[in-house]
Image: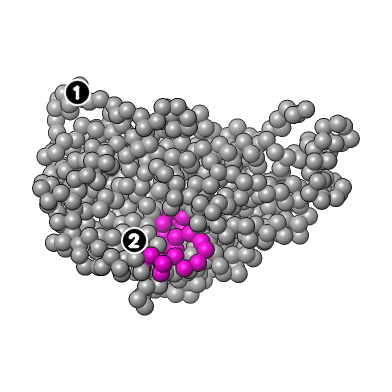
Amino acid sequence: MTKRRSQHWFGGNGKDAFIHRSWMKNGGLPDDAFDGRPVIGICNTFSEFTPCNAHFRGLVEHIKAGVLEAGGLPLEFPVFSCGESNLRPTAMLFRNLASMDVEESIRGNPMDGVVLMAGCDKTTPSLVMGAASCDLPSIVISGGPMLNGRFKGKQIGSGTDVWKFSEDVRAGVMSEQEFANAESAMSRSPGHCMTMGTASTMASMVEALGIALPGNAAYPAVDAHRARLARMTGRRIVEMVHEDLRLSAILKREAFANAIRINGAIGGSTNAVVHLLAIAGRIGCELSLDDWDRFGRDIPTILDLMPSGRFLMEDFCYAGGLPAVMKEIAGLIELDAMTVTGRTVGENIAQAENFDPEVIRPTEKALTAQGGIAVLRGNLAPSGAIIKPSAASPGLMRHRGRAVVFEDIDHYKAVIDDPALDIDETCIMVLKNCGPKGYPGMAEVGNMALPQKLLQKGVRDMVRISDARMSGTAFGTVVLHVAPEAAVGGPLALVRNGDFIELDVDARKLHLDVSDAELDLRRQFWQAPVPAMDGGYQHLYTERVLQADRGADLDFLVGCRGAGIPRESH
């Protein structure tokens, strides 16, 4: 048998092995803990600043129990936790930093396999990106969604109803006291967003990719099934080490094609685009922005869940969860793709059932016949931009309007409710300098709130265009991820008030009605914005971050560097 990776630390009788074993024994480990059994690192993103993951202290104990039952040695380690709700200027700024933490923690420590404990939006991609760059046997366990929100006898969804209620307050149809009351009614239990926000989407994506056990996406955080799944995850990672089943054996092109198709079927977050591109880049799998259109264009959205539909994650779980969705579209996905179970996708979903066709609709009753993510191109977005049709207004999917331009987020906030702002519902709102370099970190500000004077008229959607992202819980006819971004001199930087812009989603077109000669003239007067910070991680980030169409990873992090044995430390 090949010497396990951990035995390069713990095996033998020399001085170095003495040091490694002796210090580990101060926690009470017996001699036979180092007898060559698989050492499993449990990568925990617990943080009280990350409410979505704050219950991980309890969940990790179930994982450890599973590892022990299977004959492994579980050792927990912390990494940077990207909490979406509190971290400023945006958690996305720190996704790549967290991935570096994960990668170096895995490579530098004596582990043979890894359990990745993810939950809040960026914790999932950061962990998978870091693990992919090491390529040890790895498996994801998500923390699970909160219970459904309840307010005034109705279900309300995290994020999605925040945007709705906020607009209603500004429109004068909801009181500030009602808004305050809804605050406590929305978040009723531990867990992440119970809408199909980015957290639920990425929990679905790791299951769709085959790097989490079936059922991972939807079981609520407080359901006993979540604890049992954690225990089974602990058992399975030990078996994966024995089998030497690594991420590179699972994260193939067919796995990413499945994830893109399933993202369309569930009405998943636009943020999945940058995250899957980045993960593919780390494992060395060819995946492009155009693949999102190639694989996802004709996929029907069959999950009736906020923000695209009516229901919430608890309903989704008890309707059958992601396996039921995958079985419903089985003819559209790669059933032979391998998964962490050691079985194929087809084998995993063979016994899946749909217990509620109102929640998981049959394809002939889809919410949107062509769901997924639409990739737009044109002279305004030469490297691409995206829109989520299932969350947009059908009447705005083909639209020509006058641009109302906001140079950055501060400019937008300063003037959006000014009664003198020259804007009506036919206009197109354009926000600049909110991309990877410009914000920095590509914040979730693309779903700009509409002007108060239009909200009071009953307007609830307009075409909005930016180089920013938006929350997966958000909705509207919002064009995002425009690349190249304004901060690097992309065409978006040259848009002026009064320009006309054409959007045609069916034709995948985003066009600025300004001549090339005029744009060249404007470019001569363009000046790059001053970076928000000089020095530190932000400086490194803005210097080395790739554009959205390439996953917004740092250029020097792309690729799989493996988990070779580092030099001895003494």
The residue tagged 2 is 162
Residue 461 horizontal/vertical position (percent): 22, 57
Q: Look at the picture and state if 114 lies above or below 268.
A: above
Q: Which residue is drawn at 40% across and 48% down?
A: 271
- Looking at this rendering, what residue extends furthest in the top direction? 524
Q: Residue at x 37, y 44 (%)?
A: 443
Query: Can you say which quadrant of the picture contains the C terminus?
Result: top right
Q: From where the camera sits, is residue 328 visible?
A: no
Residue 457, picture quadrant: bottom left
- Looking at this rendering, what residue extends furthest in the front direction? 177
- Looking at this rendering, what residue extends furthest in the right direction? 13
Labelled disc at residue 403:
none
Mark 1 or 2: the one toward you: 2
Q: Give the range drawn in magenta.
A: 182-202
Mark 1 to mark 2 CA distance (whole Å): 40 Å
Labelled disc at residue 525:
1
Which of marks 2 and 1 precedes in the sequence?
2
Drawn side of residue 163 relative to residue 346, left or right: left
Secondary structure of the residue carrying numbered label 1? loop
